[in-house]
Image: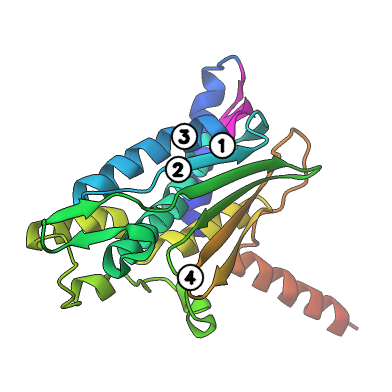
Amino acid sequence: FITRISTRILTENYINMRTPRPGWAGVVQRDLVPLDIVQDISSKITNLTESIYGVAPVVEFRGNLTCTLDYIPRHLRFMAQEMLKNACRATTERHIRSGRQGAGYDIRSGRLDAKIPNVVVELQKGDVHVIIKISDQGGGMPKKLQEEAWEYGWSTANSMEDSDDPSSAWDSSSKAWRKELAGFGFGLPLTRLHAQYFGGDVFMQAMPGHGTDMYLLLNHLKEGSPSTETEDPSTALTENENRLSSHNAP
């Protein structure tokens, strides 16, 4: 995955540098406003969520909404999309299933009550990072599952499909649509990989029985910034062998 990210960035950057655009340095957009991208993504995800479940949480924005950074919009779009998908799906499924705070499926009327807690997106700008915090009330997860959530291919998407709960308000056709929202268990690990590639990171703070806070840290990609991407394993192995050879040399 690291090789694919590297190859795509180098290729797109080479093409874009040959046709310069104002406000851009290759694939990096100067003074990018994260709010613009996250707002655009959130509207599409809430529409998708509502088309599947009949209801969707409102995405609320807080914090430093005018903060900017130099970054690759494509990367930010992918990472924010995956995190918002998880937050909207978890919140909707939990409150449809449990009927908490009045949200749920009314069997007598055959109607969905849309009182679902908001998903909150908070943006802040630090000296080194821009921090995007996405908070949901999707029930969180037990501590023993928090590490598994970062594994490739691991997902909780099948738990609702396998449920016999009568409050499940979707049919077999909508289950297929849910794959577009739930994915195949690659969203979180790939999000962390994209963030760490340029020295950022993703953290999870799960509160079992309540919800989850996800923190996305983005580095400013200013010209002259030191390289912070993950070392290619083959390169690291070669350098280590060279160091050992130099120490063993007579």
- Indicate the colouring scheme: rainbow
The numbered mark, 4 or 3, whose residue comes first in the sequence reads 3
Proximity of marks 3 and 2: CB atoms separated by less than 8 Å: no
Amino acid type assigned to the residue bearing label 1 in the image: Ile
Dot 4 corresponds to which residue?
140
Q: CA distance from mark 1 to mark 4?
A: 30 Å
The numbered mark, 1 or 4, whose residue comes first in the sequence reads 1
Q: Residues within 10 Å of mark 1 (few under 14, many from 20)?
A: some
> Is 30 a magenta residue?
yes
Q: Residues within 10 Å of mark 4 (few under 14, many from 20)?
A: many
In the drawing, does residue 179 fall left or right of residue 245? left
In the drawing, does residue 160 fall left or right of residue 123? left
Residue name at image x 44 percent, y 50 percent:
84
Residue name at image x 79 percent, y 79 percent:
245
**Whether residue 182 is situated above or below residue 84 in the rendered picture:** below
Q: Residue 181 appears at what percent x and percent y?
A: 30, 54
Residue name at image x 63 percent, y 42 percent:
123
Q: Residues within 10 Å of mark 3 (few under 14, many from 20)?
A: some
Q: Which mark is residue 72?
A: 1
Proximity of marks 1 and 3: CB atoms separated by less than 8 Å: no
- Residue 79 visible in the picture: yes
Proximity of marks 2 and 1: CB atoms separated by less than 8 Å: no
- Residue 53 visible in the picture: no
Amino acid type assigned to the residue bearing label 3 in the image: Gln
Amino acid type assigned to the residue bearing label 4 in the image: Gly
Q: Which mark is residue 39?
A: 3
Q: Residues within 10 Å of mark 2 (few under 14, many from 20)?
A: many
Front tag of 2 and 1: 2
Q: Which mark is residue 59?
A: 2
Q: Range of the magenta residues?
A: 23-34
Q: CA distance from mark 2 to mark 1?
A: 23 Å
Q: Residue 236 appears at what percent x and percent y?
A: 67, 68
